[in-house]
Image: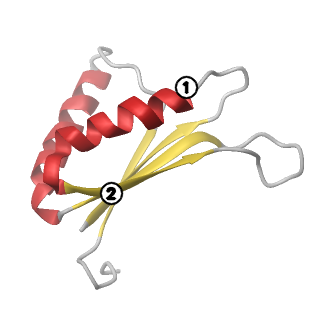
Amino acid sequence: MIKFNVLYPFKPGMRFDHDYYRDKHMPLLAKCLGETCRSYTIDKGLAGRAPGSEPPFAAACSVYCELAGVNYLVRSASTILAGRRRGMISMDSVVSASFAQQGRAPAA
């Protein structure tokens, strides 16, 4: 099983369309991944640690996929990041991936 996270840093005055992300974007991602995608979660940033402070992230998602689909995910991420380096894609998100074998903690 693989879990990858996408985090969208909060910026004052930014607009993040949570309805679109929930209703269109994530279902499209799940459809593209097919049976490899087991599930996903979406979180909306509401507040920071201190009372009245802004959240560190406007939104975050976690996608859980079967290990068999890792090659597809790596190729897709490589293509997206290569486009970003060439200035073709503008993303303000931070992508992190964590790998774990099902039922076992990742090796240290």
In the image, farthest residue toward the right: 51
Q: Identify the residue shown where x is 64% and y is 34%.
A: 10
Q: Identify the residue shown where x is 62% and y is 42%.
A: 57
Q: What type is the residue that disc 1 sits on?
A: Asp
Q: How many marks?
A: 2
Residue picked out by circle 2 = 39
SS assignment at label 1 = loop
* C-alpha separation, residue under disc 1 versus residue under disc 2: 21 Å
Residue 108 is situated, as x and y percent measured from the top left of the image, at 35, 80
SS assignment at label 2 = strand
Residue 89 is situated, as x and y percent measured from the top left of the image, at 33, 19
Note whether 88 is above or below 16 in the view shown.
Answer: above
Residue picked out by circle 1 = 17
In the image, farthest residue toward the front: 23
Task: Specify which label sits upstream in the sequence, 1 or 2.
Answer: 1
Residue 19 is situated, as x and y percent measured from the top left of the image, at 52, 30
Find out whether the residues at labels 1 and 2 contact each other: C-beta distance under 8 Å.
no
Residue 29 is situated, as x and y percent measured from the top left of the image, at 28, 38
| In the displayed structure image, the side of residue 93 where residue 66 appears, left or right | left
Note whether 7 is above or below 108 in the view shown.
Answer: above
Q: Identify the residue shown where x is 46% and y is 32%.
A: 21
| In the displayed structure image, the side of residue 31 where residue 87 appears, left or right | right
Q: Quadrant of residue 4?
A: bottom left
| In the displayed structure image, the side of residue 16 where residue 93 appears, left or right | left
Q: Quadrant of residue 35?
A: bottom left
**Disc number for residue 75:** none
> Crowding at label 2, few (<14), some or many (≥20) Cα neighbours within 10 Å?
few
State which quarter of the image contains the N terminus. Answer: bottom left
